[in-house]
Image: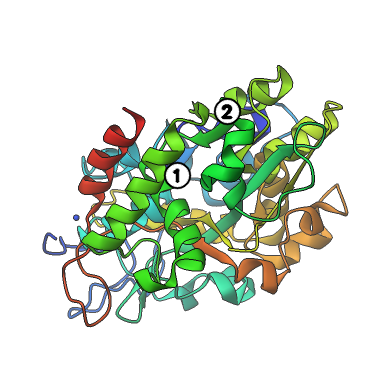
């Protein structure tokens, strides 16, 4: 995800080309349909696997000797795992396009670009045995499928919540208006925090969708010029109340600990970490809904070791591994069977893993593209335009 350096468990977290040939060499990849390039089987593993991943997604015991789901995978498949840790979604896209990696743990603000660019292969998900047990809400989504084809194994997800200091913010806020409406935001001027990322424009769009229905916003990532300008103007207005745009979870946590921030967009992980440290904070999903992230393991269309990647995707979808990574990283697992295996029996409740009402209030990240996905046509603002606007917003 492109919020930089995402890795909650260690306080750091860290668009069209023709589809290239996929898995053409016999024995070097799953067989594919000649019309769709869909991978339809898993062949003999190749002995190696080169991954691009968020920090904390491919733990081999080197960070904490008790946290290791890579070594058992290597023993089972004979695929030696080499992981390149990426700090942003932009970095992931750039690395994938070098053709040097077999797969990636992409968030929606990268996965759409990879699908549209032909950088990842569609997969017949029935060849991955653990896919059947993945939360149905995470399947066939705009960020992991296109035209009826699936592009990967859902990994985990989380919402962007409104985190606040209970001593400084009273009564408890239930709306994003507390940070967007000048009448409310001015009370916390200089102590409001927001993530330092262009995708935050969607958070403003979520608020406007609920509060200014005349704008006609139905998807915070599909904004025409008027809708986009309204969101950008709202964020420029908010800028004068912002004390800090947080670059990573460590900074976000410390800003609450030292009193520099009292309210703003964050994650459940930071909330739990601060509470565990004795800070009087809480977080809610505001009444307007929110944005959020859902990650997907995807197979490179240029993979040198496609079968090892397919085995990895299936491994990462298993309930035992899902339980391990969900707790280590700080997220809701995609495989709900993991909820019975977490060391903390309340983990899935804390992260709302089975709460469909909660899930339905989240607009998960996806890369903004010109195609609005409706009868407006290709008049929506692209990710490049979001990036440019974000620079202007911050001043």
**Depth check, front residue: 64 or 114:** 114
In-image side of 232 versus 207 (left or right): left
Colour setting: rainbow
Which numbered disc flags the more N-terminal residue, 1 or 2?
Answer: 1
Res 1 label:
1
**Residue 309 in picture, x, y percent from top left:** 42, 53
1 and 2 marks in contact (CB < 8 Å): no
**Depth check, front residue: 326 or 200:** 200
Tell me the element at label 2.
Answer: loop
The residue under the point 26% across, 50% down is: 383
Q: Is residue 61 above or below residue 133?
A: above
The residue under the point 58% across, 23% down is: 251
Q: How many marks?
A: 2
The residue under the point 73% across, 54% down is: 351
Which picture quadrant has residue 131? bottom right
Q: Is residue 357 visible?
A: yes
Which picture quadrant has residue 32? bottom left
In-image side of 170 versus 48 (left or right): right
Res 32 label:
none
**Residue 204 in picture, x, y percent from top left:** 45, 52
Categorize mark 2 by other alpha carbons within 10 Å: few (<14), some (14-19), many (20+): many
User: Which residue is denoted by mark 2 in the rendering?
Assistant: 12
In-image side of 351 versus 62 (left or right): right
**Residue 339 in picture, x, y percent from top left:** 78, 61
The CA distance from mark 1 to mark 2 is 12 Å
**Depth check, front residue: 102 or 395:** 395
């Amino acid at each position: 995800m492109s919020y930089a350096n995402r890795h909650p468990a260690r306080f750091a977290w860290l668009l069209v080309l023709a589809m290239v040939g996929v898995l053409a060499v016999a024995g070097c990849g799953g067989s594919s349909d000649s019309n769709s390039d869909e991978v339809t089987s898993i062949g003999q593993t190749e002995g190696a696997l080169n991954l691009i991943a968020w920090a904390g997604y491919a733990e081999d015991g080197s960070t904490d000797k008790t946290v290791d789901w890579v070594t058992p995978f290597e023993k089972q498949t004979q695929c030696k795992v080499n992981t390149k840790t990426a700090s942003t979604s932009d970095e992931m896209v750039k690395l994938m396009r070098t053709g040097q990696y077999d797969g990636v743990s992409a968030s929606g603000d990268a996965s759409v670009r990879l699908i549209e660019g032909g950088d990842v292969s569609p997969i017949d998900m029935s060849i991955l045995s653990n896919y059947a047990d993945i939360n149905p809400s995470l399947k066939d989504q705009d960020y992991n499928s296109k035209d009826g084809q699936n592009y990967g194994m859902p990994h985990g997800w989380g919402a962007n919540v409104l985190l606040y200091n209970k001593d400084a913010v009273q009564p408890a806020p239930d709306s994003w208006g507390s940070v967007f409406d000048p009448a409310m935001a001015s009370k916390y001027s200089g102590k409001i925090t927001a993530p330092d990322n262009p995708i935050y424009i969607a958070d403003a769009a979520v608020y406007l969708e609920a509060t200014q229905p005349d704008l006609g916003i139905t998807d915070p990532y599909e904004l025409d010029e008027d809708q986009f300008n309204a969101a950008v103007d709202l964020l420029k207005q908010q800028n004068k109340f912002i004390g800090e745009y947080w670059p990573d979870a460590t900074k976000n946590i410390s800003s609450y600990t030292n009193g520099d921030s009292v309210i703003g967009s964050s994650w459940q992980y930071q909330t739990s970490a601060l509470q565990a440290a004795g800070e009087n904070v809480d977080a809610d999903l505001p009444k307007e809904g929110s944005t959020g992230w859902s990650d997907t393991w995807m197979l490179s269309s240029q993979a040198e070791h496609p079968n090892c990647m397919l085995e990895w995707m299936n491994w990462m979808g298993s309930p035992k591994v899902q339980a391990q990574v969900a707790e280590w990283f700080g997220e809701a697992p995609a495989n709900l069977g993991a909820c019975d295996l977490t060391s903390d029996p309340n983990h899935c409740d804390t992260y709302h893993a089975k709460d469909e009402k909660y899930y339905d209030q989240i607009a998960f990240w996806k890369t903004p593209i010109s195609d609005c996905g409706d009868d407006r046509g290709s008049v929506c603002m692209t990710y490049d335009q979001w990036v440019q606007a974000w620079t202007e917003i911050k001043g």
